[in-house]
Amino acid sequence: MPELPEVETMVRGLRPALAGRLLGTVKVHDPFLLEGTNCATFEHLASGRKVERIDRSGKWVLIILEADSGVIVIQPRMTGAFWLVPPDRPEHARLTFRLQGSDQVVWYCDARRLGKIRWHDTLGDARVACARSQGPDALEISRDDLAHRLKQTSRSIKPTLMDQKVLAGIGNIYADEILFASRLHPERVASQLKPAELDRLHAAVGEVLHRAVEAEGSSFDAHYRTVLGLEGGFLATNAMYGRAGRPCPHCGNPIVREHIRGLIGRSTYYCPRCQPPRVRRA
DNA sequence: CGGTTACCCTGGATGC
DNA sequence: TGCATCCAGGGTAACC
């Protein structure tokens, strides 16, 4: 469930706790999440290093160590989360960062163990790994780059927006909000959007994601919390996600929940009146 | 090769 | 009350 706004909230919360700090012991509690290296190697490489800064790439968290001595990349995927507050080890803790000269501990927890933890020797290696599986960040992509990328596929617009190789950061919740704000049906063919529709879509990507970052993301159950354990506020004000049968905030007609073509097993919420499958005649 | 589907994993909600 | 089933969905692999 962490999409771009939730991961951005994690990164902003981690910065004051980790940036510029010297790591003490780093401990992996669950080797299942670790890819490309073993626990002993990872712990040896990371422990005792100074954190230079925390970055985000799409839905990934990058913990960049000083003097290009390594990068820890964490993909929270569905249920990964960071915790600063609990003094004792929380449930589902998979990775622990202790800090030198402090009692502060940063926990990475992941109930469903879908998340991934990777070590990269250099920032260059980490950037290559990001670029291999992610397109431009959704908050940075230009209108023309987005338009060009959507032209390349005959898929529906919703699964295309959620394809991290097209642009990085959008998942199921924000795809629905963005398409509502753009007045586009989720099954519109990505390559057939008109220039005016591409304008609306590009504006909506930035507008919706910025609004969600301001609200510190979305929480619909205990899985996602900010690093202080607080709920994100986005779902208190959102238009579509989780609101089947309730009135569309624009036209008042009931919001529909469906499984759309190309996205089996995931719910899509939209307004059939405001988001018609084809362009209405003017 | 592009598009679609199955599967990974676990906890909470729902159904009988 | 208890057990089985379903559902959440990010991402990748395998499939057609």
Image (cartoon, coloured by chain):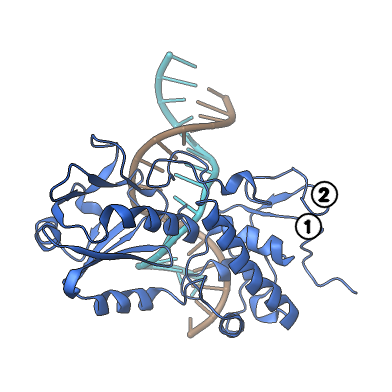
Chain colours: A blue, B brown, C cyan
Which residue appears farthest toward the right when viewing the image? A282
The chain to which mark 1 is attached is A
Residue on which disc 1 sits: A272
* Mark 2 crowdedness (10 Å alpha carbons): few <14, some 14-19, many ≥20: some
Of residues A157 and A134, the one drawn nearer to the viewer in this rendering: A134
Residue B1: percent from the left, percent from the top? 48, 85
Amino acid carrying label 1: it is Pro
Residue A125: percent from the left, percent from the top? 25, 77
The chain to which mark 2 is attached is A
Secondary structure category for the residue under label 2: loop
Instruction: Say which quadrant the C terminus of chain A sits in.
Output: bottom right
Amino acid carrying label 2: it is Asn
Residue for point 30% across, 58% down? A116
In the figure, A135 relative to A255: above or below? below
Residue on which disc 2 sits: A253
Q: Is residue A115 visible?
A: no
Residue A184: percent from the left, percent from the top? 72, 67
Residue for point 42% across, 47% down? A226
Of residues A22 and A177, the one drawn nearer to the viewer in this rendering: A22
Distance (Cα) linking label 1 and label 2: 8 Å
Q: Is residue A15 visible?
A: yes
Residue A121: percent from the left, percent from the top? 18, 73
